[in-house]
Image (cartoon, grey):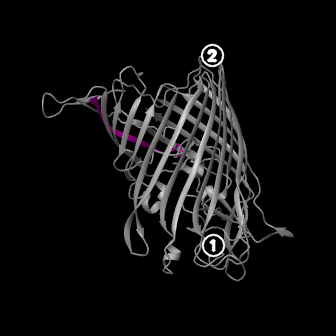
Amino acid sequence: MQTLALTGLTALSAPAWAGDFVDTRLSFVFADDNVLAGAGETTPNSPNARFGAGNQNTQFYDNFNTKFSGFESLSNIVLYKRMPAFFEGLTTEAALTLLVLERPSGGVDILDNSSYVRLNYQPPGWGEKEGLSLTGFPVSADRFRLGYAYRISWGGSPIFTNRAAAAGVPGAKLQLTRDTWYAYLGGKTALVLNDLVLEQETLYGVMGGAGWDILETLRVEAGGGFFQKGIVPGLANQGIEASVNAAGVSGQIVYHVGVPVGTSIDFRLYKNDPEIYQRFFAPEQYPGGLSYSVSLEGSYLTQTLQDPDTFGATKPQGATALALQGRAKFNLLRFNVLALYRSLSFIQFDVPGFPPFQDFPTGTELKPEMFVAVGADYHLPDLHLTPGFILGVQQPASFRSPQPLIGGSNPPLGISGTRTVVVRDANQLSILPSTCGSGVCEAEPILSAKATFRWDLSESVAAVGEVYYTYDTNRTTFEDDVTGIAQPNFEKPHALGFNTLLQARF
C-alpha cells in the first residue's frame, strides 16, 4: 500500500498519512438470483439476469461476520495521524474514516465509519501491545459493539432504534490491555425525539467487557450493556410516559490451534500508517499441516416493551442467540461448520419488537430461527483456483398470533384471520395463507446448496463464481382473489441462481 505524506503549515509539523483508499472493494457483477422466475412473478421481485447484485443474491449462511453482502463497490478514505505526546509513554492518534458506498441505482453515499481520536499510555516495562487506551468516536461508535460474530452482535448505533442511528451515535471506550487479558468500559449517547414533549432528548448507553487467554489456545470473553431507547410512542399518544430500557450480556469461548482468534473486519478501527502495514484482503495462505478453531458464543438480552394485553402497561421481553463456528485447514483443504440460533425477539431487538415497541400478545406461537451449514474447499496452487461447496438447512423464525391480523399496510388491506408470519430478518416478512390442505400453514425448513469457485488472478484481483439452489416452501406473493382482495399465495419453492464477480480488493 502506497502512502502520501502531507506536510503541515510549519516545518515542525509531523506528516499526516492519507490514502490510497483503505479496504477498497470494486465488484463487477453479473448475476440472477432466480433463473426460474421472471419479473413480477415473485416477492421480492426477481428480475432477469443483470449486471449488479445485492442481499437478494445471498443465502442465509452467507456473510456471517460482516454487514455487507459482498457485492458492493465501496472504499474507506482514511486520513490518519499518529505521534508521541509531550508526556513520556503517551501516544496520540486519530483517523477520519469515511465510507464511500456506490448505490446500485447510481450515485454515492458518504458516511462516517467510526472516525476516532485515541490516546494510548504505555507504562515503563510494558509490552509493545500493552497499555491503557481511551478512544473517542465523535460521530459514530457503531464499530464499538457487544458480541463477537457480526450477525448476532448488538449495541451498535441501531440499539437506540433507527431514529437515532440515522443521526449518528457518538461514544467513547476506555480499555486496559495486558499480555494475556483485557478489560474495557465505554458508553454512547443518542438524540431521539420524545413523543410527549416533541423535542429531542439524550439517551444513554453503557458497555463493558473483558477477555482472558487462559491458555495459548483457549480464550474466554464476556461483555454486557445497558441502553435507554426512549419512550413508547403508542403510549405517549395516550399521554402515558413509559420508558424502553434494554440490557444484555454476551459471552464467548474459543479454542484455537495454529490460528489467531479472529474478529470481524467491521469491528476493527481503520488506520493508514506506513509503520503498521495492514493487509485486509491478502490471498489465503496454506503453510501446510493442521490448524483449526472452534468458538461458541451466546447472548441473552431483555428490553421493556408495551404490553398488548394490559392497557397502559409495559413488560420485559427476553431475547437469546447462540452461534457455533468451527474452521479447520489441513494442507490445501479447508472445512467449516456454522450453526445459529436466534429467537424472534432477538431478530427484532433493534426495531424494537413487532409491531414496533410492542411485545407479542399472550398465546402467540413463537418459533426461533435455527440453521446449520457445512462447507469445504480445496486450493489448487498451480492454477490459483479454489473450488468448494456449501450445504445448509434453516428453520426460519415465525410467529402465529392468537388474534386476527388487522388490515393495514402490512399485512395488506383485506387480510384477516390468524396466520403464520415467517420472519427472515428484521422486518423481512412472508405471510403464509391461512390454511394448507386440512391444517394450519406452518413455516417449513429451507434447504440450500451452493457450488463456489475462486480464481486468484493476482494478489488483489480475483474472479469468483457461485451457483446455488434453494428449496423454500415459505415463499409467498399476493394475488387478488375472486372478490378483488389481495391474498397470500405460495410461489414455486424452487430457486436456481448464480453470481459471477470480477472483484478487486485492497
Q: From the viewer's perspective, is 18 left or right of 170?
A: left
292 shown above or below 434: above
Task: Indicate the quadrant where residue 421 lies.
Answer: bottom right
71 in magenta: yes
Residue 80: image x %, image y %? 31, 35
**From mark 1 to mark 2, how far is it between C-alphas?**
55 Å
Q: Quadrant of the C terminus?
A: top left
- Say which of 317 and 400 sits in front: 317
Rendered residue at 38%/35% (across/down): 133
Residue 332: image x %, image y %? 65, 21
Residue situated furthest top in the rendering:
288
Secondary structure state at the residue bearing disc 1: loop
Amino acid at dot 2? Gly
Q: Is there a contact, CB below 8 Å, between mark 1 and mark 2?
A: no
Rendered residue at 41%/68% (across/down): 193
Residue situated furthest front in the rendering:
124
Amino acid at dot 1? Pro
Residue situated furthest left in the rendering:
10
- How many dots with numbers? 2
Residue 1: image x %, image y %? 37, 27
Lower position in the chain sequence, tag 1 or tag 2: 2
Name the residue tied to disc 2. 288
* Residue 104 shows in the view: no
Q: Residues within 10 Å of mark 1 (few under 14, many from 20)?
A: some
Considering the whole magenta stretch, tell me its main secondary structure.
strand
Magenta span: 68-84
Name the residue tied to disc 1. 411
285 in magenta: no
* Residue 277 shows in the view: yes
Residue 249 image label = none
Residue 198: image x %, image y %? 38, 74
- Say which of 49 and 408 sits in front: 408
